Image: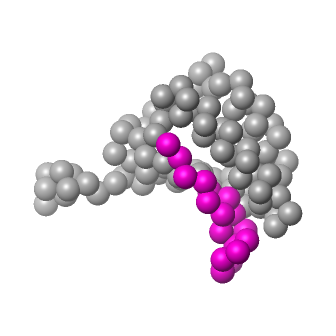
Amino acid sequence: MFLVRRVCKVERKDVWAVAKLLRLICNAYENDNRRNSAMIYITGAGTPAQDMSVCAEWTQETIEANRSPNVPAVVKKANLEMIPLLKSYEIEFHEVATDEKIAERT
């Protein structure tokens, strides 16, 4: 299992607009049963943080390339709206240390 996190660095004025667009993007993949439910969260707006960011985080069993023909139209549209609002857009992949994996590898 993997934890995937998209991190969008933004200006304060764009925080909620980016959160809305990330929610639309995540919903499109969830509705297609392509990934588990995502949590959208904001850092720096009402909490202490070095930078303002909006993140989407979810788990999935495997990591595979998401080829362009498979990207839902709503995701393409939302990305076009979101990209101009971002200072940076990164993706992180983390392997989840499940009890089973720990037992196998120790």
Q: Nearer the viewer, residue 91 or 47?
A: 47
Residue that sits furthest to the top in the current view: 69
Q: How is the image coloured?
A: one colour
Quarter of the image with the C terminus in it: bottom left
How far across and down, in percent of the image, does residue 16 sit?
Answer: 77, 57
Question: Horizontally, is 55 left or right of 94 in the view?
Answer: right
Q: Residue at x 53, y 34 (%)?
A: 30
Circle count: 0
Q: Is residue 99 magenta?
A: no
**Rendered position, 84 above or below 16:** above
Q: Is residue 105 in sight in this rendering?
A: no
How far across and down, in percent of the image, does residue 8 sit?
Answer: 69, 56
Q: Residue at x 63, y 19 (%)?
A: 69
Q: Is residue 19 in sight in this rendering?
A: yes
Q: Which residues are magenta?
A: 37-55
Q: Is residue 39 magenta?
A: yes
How far across and down, in percent of the image, does residue 74 sit?
Answer: 72, 29
Would you identify the image quadrant in which residue 83 lies? top right
Q: Residue at x 65, y 25 (%)?
A: 72
How far across and down, in percent of the image, does residue 103 sit?
Answer: 13, 56
Quarter of the image with the N terminus in it: top left
**Rendered position, 39 above or below 27:** below
Question: Horizontally, is 76 left or right of 59 in the view?
Answer: right
Q: Nearer the viewer, residue 88 or 60?
A: 60
**Rendered position, 69 above or below 5:** above
Would you identify the image quadrant in which residue 23 lies? top right
Q: Nearer the viewer, residue 4 or 28?
A: 28
Would you identify the image quadrant in which residue 68 lies? top right
Question: Horizontally, is 59 left or right of 31 in the view?
Answer: left
